[in-house]
Image (tube, helix red, strand yellow):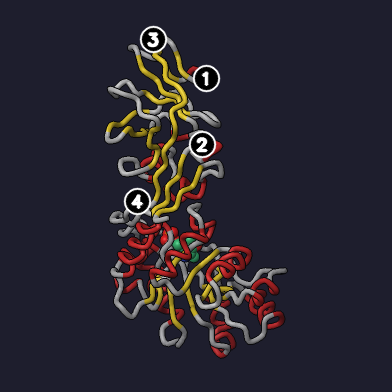
Amino acid sequence: MGAAQLTIDLDAICANWHALDALSDSEVETAAVVKADAYGIGAAQAATALAEAGARSFFVALAEEGVALRDVLGDKPDIFVFSGHMEGMSDALVSACLIPLLNAPDQVSRHAENAPSRPFGVQLDTGMNRLGFGPSEWNDCKGELLESGPLLVMSHLACADEPDHPMNAQQLVAFRRLTDGISPRRSLAATGGILLGPEYHFDLTRPGVGLYGGRPFGEARPAIRLDVPVIQTRTVQPGETVGYGSAWTATSPTRVATISAGYADGLLRAAAPGAVVFAGNTPCPVVGRISMDLITVDVSGLQEVPGSLQVIGRNASVDAFAEAAGTIGYEVLTSLGARYERVYLPQ
Ligand SMILES: *Cc1c(COP(=O)(O)O)cnc(C)c1O
């Protein structure tokens, strides 16, 4: 075994989808967000499994991602595109029957001109100031847009992973003010919004990270496991250092294992010091800096050094690794490297 093995549990992803679906009323549709190659996990495999599990609507960031997804999923599912109708993407949107979430008046004109009478949705900005019609633009265009029958009117929460943040209630009020009484289906909640409770669910929810086992969905089943082979081990004597910059110095004789993955594989350099990997249930701290292709680990606590150590898995969550690196699970997932040997379960 040379490359590390990334095992992706498609049953866990489907179980997470069912669990998130069960948090909203039965008339609320639970969609699936599979942008960025399903957060690095593999959009083709994840979306196929989720469609079999019952997901009928999928969300991607870019039209290009939607085109690839349409090939995989066939004609039936709805595929929404968060970036809307961007210049140069009309043919892709039309030929793959994608549903752009129009986010500004220029996109509305482009859609009317290049994809007349083709389905679309509308994205509103309710305070995040990132993407979508602002309140006054929406009020100007609303009549005309609603006449063309958008399939969905949506907005996105800025602070849904912090349940007590006042922004949540503010955005809920803003969304209701902009959309109460309209007939199209409405959507406000991603993973965090689902957990905020029923008033945030509207007609359709859009979980992403929770499907893939990440926070803020604390009950999520872990969806990935990363086993990294041990290349060699050595004993480092007190006073000797390990790795680039001699950043770590042994204070007692230390058994150090060198494993075959590094920051080129998405194991962020910032995670050391701090990251912990596992041999079964035994934690083994990373020592020294993370290199491009190698990580050094203190395995002194082990009776026997196994053939590989677990960097992500049952004991070592994506979020724990992210925390060591000062980032979020989303970034660790979407950084997962191209060199891993990927195994999808069930096969
Ligand atoms: C990424 C994204 C989602 C999914 O968010 P999660 O926090 O991963 O559940 C939903 N809606 C929009 C607009 C997004 O950009």
Q: Amino acid at mark 3?
A: Gln
Distance, label 2 to label 3, CA atoms, is 29 Å
Q: Amino acid at mark 4?
A: Pro
**Residues tagged 3 and 4 counted as in contact (Cβ below 8 A):** no
Residue tagged by mark 4? 222
**Whole-percent x, y for residue 235 in the image:** 39, 14
Q: Is residue 29 left or right of residue 149?
A: left
Residue tagged by mark 1? 245
Lower sequence index among marks 3 and 1: 3
Q: Residue furthest bottom?
A: 147
Residue tagged by mark 3? 237
Residue tagged by mark 2? 3
Instruction: Please name the residue shown 42% across and 55% down the image.
Output: 347
Q: Amino acid at mark 1?
A: Gly
Disc 4, SS: loop
**Residues tagged 2 and 4 counted as in contact (Cβ below 8 A):** no
Disc 3, SS: loop
Circle 3 crowding by C-alpha within 10 Å: few under 14, some 14–19, many from 20: some
Instruction: Please name the residue shown 49% across and 78% down the image.
Output: 153
